[in-house]
Image (tube, helix red, strand yellow):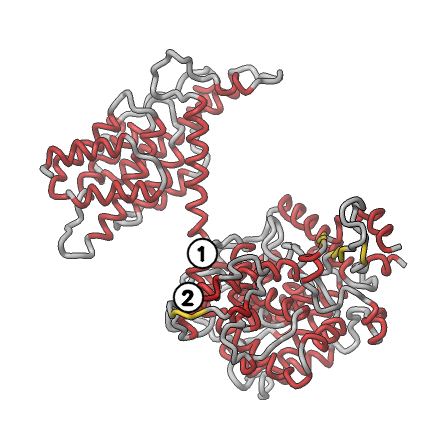
């Protein structure tokens, strides 16, 4: 029954002070951040945000977006965690917002629908959350250069586009703007939308003590005293996963540990490396390390979440190995088995068949998913016309009484 | 403008200098614009540092200015028109300058000097890494511990301490490390031989270092202390702007092993047991949020 209460309440409440506008009621909602979803929740959300005939288009676009974001990150010299947070936000955005493929946007002005502009907004917010501040203008310039867009081109804004809060220049429709100006306006508006989508929850970015998974993977390797080659291998796997939705399902420390467990199982011999490090353990020692990993005791990783990660990662490589960075670093044929690399992942998965993964009892039927008000396309009009409150799960108790009253 | 006028104006600029980066750069560009009059301009810098009436905050700013000037001079000298103006004079004068910015036992500027000297050093092919490492270590000798027992003041740090002939940059580092040792020493001495005050202290008392009539430039008034905090905060913010930069090769389409080596493998080490404990407890907090995130109980 606790589950029931945890749901969001887009309930309609009358205004607190009945004197002024007694007859009007304001929409109001309270959102308690739930940053992690099970895979059925994600597919359910996608079924609402991505039309069936756009599913492949969504994945193709995401791949292009990833390349695009990586190029910006490279040129502006951002660390990888900015890329990871950008992709996290981008994927989160399309859980709660309708995806419009690029071809549909013949209308140049409707920039907020453009996945590339969404990406720039995600990157802008991610860079702030990761404490790597750059001016939006600098990010825009790099992004436009990559896309071959002349950002100084003058355009006349159409009067229909004052959807961004609609506060300014209702009569200024005859003034001209540069492309960059219009983009800026959309990006700022998207940034505010994104903040609502992440429920003002900045925990998945860099907090003081919890790092991103690329850093955690290295730190965990050091804790287990794992050699350079396997640590590099783990770090590469993490890079592949940056563009995957795994970060929407389990927290970074569990991703990091899942990667290391896979690396210790695979023990690749022929990773292409430019730096030779001497201290190689033999397989025996590596197996021993694998045996002694205490996922909760040493890393505070609940086993079921690590298992979820392991299965996801193996599936990822079984389906997309040829597009992965590992493919660049490993030879096509594995010398030990004499087979393509992908078989190693398949073989490993068959050994992990009976792992206990996330329990989806409450998400098993569409009906139960439909009842969950949190899993809806996000209605921006509620907070703009009425009130929207956002809080973290662990702050809920402070408001419990108030919330329960609102529900009843 | 003739050389004399340029020097006068330059001196005025320096006296009014604030540590905001654009101001420092503007002053450096002025010096470079009139670099033909280096013989007139450079002494202005030295004079200001020796001026007993200039407060210690300004001296710290001047040293930061020197860092900027060195950077800019190297940058300008990529054009054939410039031939590394000021570099030689500054380098020769570095040891003396450091002592001026860190007068007597007042080492308030030591961190700023360290940061600037580190940045200046990068331009020269002189090996100074051992000093950089030494600066961050515990420098007190056994002999120091003995003198500490006796509550003796640390001997003055003088230029003559470095008799042997070495490159001025190296002797600058040696002096700075010695200054650091002095500051460590004086801190321990203060803790050891002074009463701990347990009663509540008012804000006025905290800032009451300098009497109104006191003209000693090495002591700061409340206003100066607050201004200095603000300036240092600004400087810290500036350093954070570049701290995270990752340089990647232009022609790579993917990440490279070098990035892993220098930004991960060489940067992270296993946590100390204490840090690990704190880290695990913050993970526990995260786990609680994660657990609440799913509808069903997972763990």
Q: Is residue A247 left or right of residue B77?
A: right
- Mark 1 closeness class: few <14, some 14–19, many ≥20 residues within 10 Å: few
Residue A295 visible within the image:
no
User: For the view shown, which residue lies furthest in the bottom direction?
Assistant: A339
Using the numbered discs, state the Cα–Cα distance from disc 1 to disc 2 in whole angstroms. Answer: 23 Å
Could you say which is closer to the camera, residue A258 or residue A407?
Answer: A407
Q: Secondary structure at mark 2?
A: strand
Q: Give the labeled residue for mark 2.
A: A176
Q: Is residue B63 above or below residue A219?
A: above
Q: Chain of mark 2?
A: A
Residue at 25% x, 36% y is B94
Q: Secondary structure at mark 1?
A: loop
Image coords of residue A395 (percent x, y) = 75, 48
Q: Chain of mark 1?
A: A
Image coords of residue B230 (percent x, y) = 45, 34
Image coords of residue A61 (percent x, y) = 56, 78
Q: Is residue B234 above or below residue B102?
A: below
Q: Give the labeled residue for mark 1.
A: A135
Could you say which is closer to the camera, residue B256 or residue B31?
Answer: B31
Residue B219 occupies quadrant: top left
Residue at 62% x, 69% y is A91
Image coords of residue A192 (percent x, y) = 59, 58
N-terminal of the pair, mark 1 or mark 2, is: 1
Residue A83 visible within the image:
yes
Query: Which quadrant of the figure contains the C terminus of chain B?
Result: bottom right
Q: Are marks 1 and 2 on the same chain?
A: yes
Q: Is residue B14 above or below residue A262?
A: above
Q: Is residue A67 left or right of residue B299?
A: left
Residue A383 occupies quadrant: bottom right
């Amino acid at each position: 029954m606790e589950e029931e209460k945890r749901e969001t309440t887009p309930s309609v409440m009358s205004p607190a002070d009945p004197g002024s506008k007694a007859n009007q009621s304001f929409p109001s909602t309270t959102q308690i951040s739930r940053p992690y979803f099970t895979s059925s929740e994600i597919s359910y959300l996608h079924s609402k945000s991505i039309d069936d005939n756009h599913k492949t288009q969504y994945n193709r676009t995401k791949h292009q977006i990833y390349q695009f974001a990586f190029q910006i990150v490279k040129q502006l010299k951002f660390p990888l965690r900015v890329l990871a947070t950008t992709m996290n936000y981008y994927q989160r955005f399309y859980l709660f917002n309708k995806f419009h493929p690029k071809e549909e946007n013949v209308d140049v002005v409707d920039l907020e629908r453009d996945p590339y502009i969404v990406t720039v907004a995600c990157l802008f917010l991610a860079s702030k959350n990761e404490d790597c501040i750059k001016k939006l203008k600098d990010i825009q310039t790099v992004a436009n250069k990559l896309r071959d867009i002349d950002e100084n081109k003058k355009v006349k804004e159409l009067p229909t586009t004052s959807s961004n809060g609609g506060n300014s220049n209702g009569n200024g429709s005859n003034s001209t703007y540069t492309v960059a100006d219009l983009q800026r306006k959309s990006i700022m508006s998207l940034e505010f939308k994104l903040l609502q989508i992440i429920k003002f929850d900045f925990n998945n970015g860099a907090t003081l003590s919890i790092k991103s998974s690329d850093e955690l993977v290295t730190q965990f390797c050091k804790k287990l005293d794992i050699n350079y080659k396997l640590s590099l291998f783990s770090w590469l796997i993490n890079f592949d996963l940056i563009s995957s939705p795994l970060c929407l399902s389990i927290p970074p420390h569990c991703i990091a540990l899942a990667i290391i467990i896979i690396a210790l199982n695979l023990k690749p011999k022929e990773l292409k490396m430019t730096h030779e490090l001497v201290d190689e353990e033999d397989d025996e020692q590596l197996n021993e390390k694998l045996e002694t990993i205490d996922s909760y005791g040493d890393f505070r990783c609940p086993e079921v979440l690590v298992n979820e990660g392991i299965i996801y990662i193996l599936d990822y490589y079984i389906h997309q190995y040829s597009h992965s960075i590992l493919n660049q670093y490993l030879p096509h044929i594995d010398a030990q088995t004499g087979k393509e690399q992908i078989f190693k992942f398949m073989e490993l998965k068959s050994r992990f068949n009976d792992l206990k993964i996330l329990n989806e009892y409450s998400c098993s039927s569409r009906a139960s998913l439909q009842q969950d008000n949190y899993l809806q396309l996000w209605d921006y009009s509620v907070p703009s016309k009425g009130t929207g409150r956002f809080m973290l799960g662990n702050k809920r108790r402070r408001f419990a009484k108030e919330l329960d009253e609102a529900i009843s | 403008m003739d050389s004399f006028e340029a020097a006068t104006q330059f001196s005025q600029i320096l006296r009014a200098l604030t540590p905001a980066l654009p101001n420092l750069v503007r002053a450096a560009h002025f010096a470079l614009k009139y670099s033909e009059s280096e013989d007139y301009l450079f002494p202005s810098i030295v004079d200001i540092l020796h001026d007993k009436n200039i407060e210690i905050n300004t001296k710290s700013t001047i040293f930061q200015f020197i860092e900027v000037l060195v950077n800019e001079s190297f940058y300008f000298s990529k054009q054939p028109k410039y031939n590394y103006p000021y570099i030689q004079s500054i380098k020769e004068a570095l040891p003396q300058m450091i002592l001026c910015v860190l007068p007597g036992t007042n080492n308030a500027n030591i961190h700023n000097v360290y940061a600037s000297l580190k940045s200046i050093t990068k331009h020269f092919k002189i090996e100074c890494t051992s000093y950089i490492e030494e600066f961050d270590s515990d420098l007190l000798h056994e002999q120091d511990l003995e003198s500490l027992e006796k509550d003796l003041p640390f001997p003055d740090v003088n230029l003559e301490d470095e008799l042997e002939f070495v490159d001025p940059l190296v002797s600058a580092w040696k002096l700075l490390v010695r200054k650091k040792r002095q500051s460590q020493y004086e801190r321990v001495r203060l803790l050891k031989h002074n009463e701990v005050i347990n009663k509540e202290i008012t804000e006025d008392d905290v800032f009451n270092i300098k009497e109104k009539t006191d003209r000693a430039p090495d002591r700061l008034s409340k206003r100066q202390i607050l201004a200095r905090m603000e300036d240092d905060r600004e400087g810290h913010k500036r350093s954070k702007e570049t701290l995270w930069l990752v340089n990647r090769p232009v022609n790579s389409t993917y990440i490279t092993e070098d990035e892993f080596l220098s930004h991960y493998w060489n940067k992270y080490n296993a946590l100390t047991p204490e840090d690990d404990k704190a880290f695990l407890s913050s993970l526990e907090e995260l786990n609680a949020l994660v657990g609440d995130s799913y509808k069903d109980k997972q763990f």
